[in-house]
Image (spheres, grey):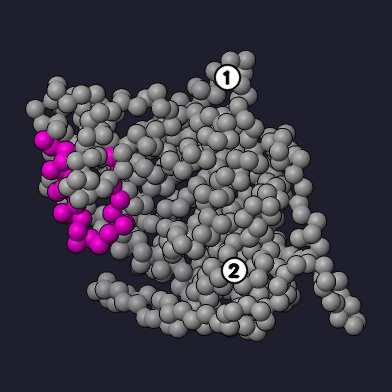
């Protein structure tokens, strides 16, 4: 199946027209999609859910005019757009040394080779001078083509009018999405523990996070249904229509929603007419299934289908990012969903971040398209998963060694980069103060001991529940695996004297 799709990509490139040239050419993922297999389904319209600000906002006429070139026999001379001439940029080229490939021998040992990558002004494939200029909001055609193919490779679309576009990373994309969809006084449904950046993004917008309980499989459908079914508009304001979820290797708990749970939640989204924001930066970091993946085809089959793949009505907005799988400094990702909402997202982007970084885009193009290709990218993701699997196992072994099971509980994460340590507060000594005070003391003592962890209360969607539980988030992705054992020992040395009776 993988080989068939890759051949299809090659054939489409051979038969399609040349990529649009010039500075910031108008680009859409529709130019690179496979339209052979129509589902016959269209997405719902979400016009009634757009924020008041979004309804007033229009796309940039100046940028639209600048992105379209009218053919002229004498050649077109552009005096209308204030884009500097590349001759006056102080950089002529950019040279990089990147991983060319990842190979695995019969014994499972991996090796990588390094290849120089050079970006120069005037290059036909992707002109460095153009990359350094203003870019088109949806992304450069060179990179957007690859990302569109990648999205088709990973997900199984159930409706026709979808698009994907580049973003300036998930944090920026979330801020824009909330502005597109939310008015002050609205509410957004989130997991009881969730990404702190999302909570901070909602606060200045006057939007309230509504905490939904979780179990070992993630967000609880029963609690979601109960809260929505019993919602009182007269007391709480407009009924929430946005569900924000991190379904894989959830931040901070490390939980991954199984397919059965996703289907339950999607059914409730249909029942209550929700838009699902699927924030999935850890999706490709497969820690458990990676041991049985011998090739990219097996790796693809090991991935739990996304909400995007379950979506039959265009209610899922999926966020992917390079931060956890390539490098966070690229500040690049991609958003996929119904065309109506993607276009509204791009209208906002034109007046905020404008476009993803040109140097980041050309770096990604050189690596993903020119060097790796789709199969090479998948092999990199497999390699990364194996490396993090080793780190996870070292951290888990250290937890078993230093943290007593009668005091601390944790689960083995199948995806991602986090372990969530729960402390049994019933075992705490009587003279250490409240749970809130204890959390602060443990955190402070751990820092004094030379190890930093994240306090569980930072991720609470409902501040009123602060002090009900005691938990800490650890990541095994930030340091060399050789120091993980010592890190857990230092944390235990801070924790145990405070809680052991």
Q: Position of residue 322 (x, y in %)?
A: 48, 60
Q: Residues within 10 Å of mark 1 (few under 14, many from 20)?
A: few
Whether label 1 touches label 2, CB < 8 Å: no
Image quadrant assignment for residue 163: bottom right
Mark 1 residue element: helix
Which region of the structure is painted magenta? 472-497
Mark 2 residue element: helix
Q: Residue at x 81, y 63 (%)?
A: 65
Q: Which mark is residue 396?
A: none
- The residue furthest left is 501
Question: What secondary structure is the stretch in magenta mostly built from?
Answer: helix
Q: Which mark is residue 236?
A: 1
Q: Residues within 10 Å of mark 2 (few under 14, many from 20)?
A: many
Looking at the picture, does residue 58 appear above or below residue 188? Answer: below
The CA distance from mark 1 to mark 2 is: 44 Å
**Left or right: 150, with 409 as reference point:** right
Q: Is residue 266 visible?
A: no
Residue under pointer 2: 358
């Amino acid at each position: 199946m993988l080989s068939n799709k890759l051949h299809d990509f090659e054939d489409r490139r051979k038969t399609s027209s040349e990529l649009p040239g010039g500075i910031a050419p108008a680009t859409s993922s529709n130019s690179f999609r496979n339209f052979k297999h129509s589902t016959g389904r269209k997405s719902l319209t979400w016009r009634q859910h757009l924020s008041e600000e979004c309804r007033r906002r229009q796309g940039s006429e100046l940028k639209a005019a600048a992105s379209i070139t009218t053919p002229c026999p004498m050649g077109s001379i552009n005096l209308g757009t204030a884009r500097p001439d590349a001759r006056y940029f102080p950089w002529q080229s950019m040279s990089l040394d990147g991983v060319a490939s990842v190979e695995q021998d019969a014994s499972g040992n991996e090796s990588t080779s390094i290849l120089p990558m050079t970006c120069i002004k005037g290059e036909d494939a992707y002109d460095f001078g153009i990359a350094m200029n203003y870019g088109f909001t949806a992304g450069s055609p060179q990179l957007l083509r690859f990302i569109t193919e990648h999205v088709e490779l990973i997900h199984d679309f159930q409706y026709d009018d979808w698009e994907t576009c580049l973003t300036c990373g998930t944090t920026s994309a979330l801020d824009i999405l909330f502005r597109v969809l939310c008015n002050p006084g609205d509410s957004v449904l989130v997991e009881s523990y969730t990404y702190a950046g999302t909570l901070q993004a909602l606060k200045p917008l006057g939007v309230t996070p509504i905490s939904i309980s979780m179990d070992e499989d993630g967000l609880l459908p029963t609690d979601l249904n109960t809260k929505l079914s019993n919602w009182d508009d007269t007391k709480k304001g407009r009924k929430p229509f946005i569900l924000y979820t991190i379904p894989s290797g959830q931040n901070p708990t490390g939980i991954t929603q199984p397919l059965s749970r996703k289907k339950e939640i999607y059914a409730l989204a249909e029942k209550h007419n929700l838009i699902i924001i699927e924030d999935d930066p850890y999706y490709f970091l497969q820690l458990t299934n990676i041991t049985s993946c011998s090739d990219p085809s097996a790796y693809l089959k090991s991935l739990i289908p996304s909400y995007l793949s379950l979506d039959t009505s265009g209610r899922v907005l999926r966020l992917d990012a390079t931060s956890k799988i390539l490098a966070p400094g690229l500040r690049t990702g991609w958003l996929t969903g119904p065309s109506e909402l993607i276009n509204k997202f791009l209208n906002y982007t034109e007046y905020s971040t404008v476009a993803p970084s040109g140097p980041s885009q050309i770096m990604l193009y050189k690596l993903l398209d020119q060097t790796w290709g789709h199969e090479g990218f998948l092999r990199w993701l497999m390699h990364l998963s194996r490396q993090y699997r080793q780190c996870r196992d070292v951290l888990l072994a250290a937890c078993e060694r230093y943290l007593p099971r009668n005091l601390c509980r944790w689960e083995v994460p199948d995806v991602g980069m986090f372990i969530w340590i729960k402390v049994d507060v019933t075992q705490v000594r009587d003279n250490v103060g409240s749970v809130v005070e204890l959390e602060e003391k443990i955190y402070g003592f751990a820092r004094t001991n030379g190890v930093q962890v994240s306090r569980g209360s930072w991720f609470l969607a409902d501040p009123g529940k602060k002090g009900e539980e005691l938990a800490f988030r650890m990541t095994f992705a930030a340091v060399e695996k050789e120091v993980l054992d010592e890190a857990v020992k230092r944390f235990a040395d801070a924790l145990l004297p405070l809680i052991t009776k």
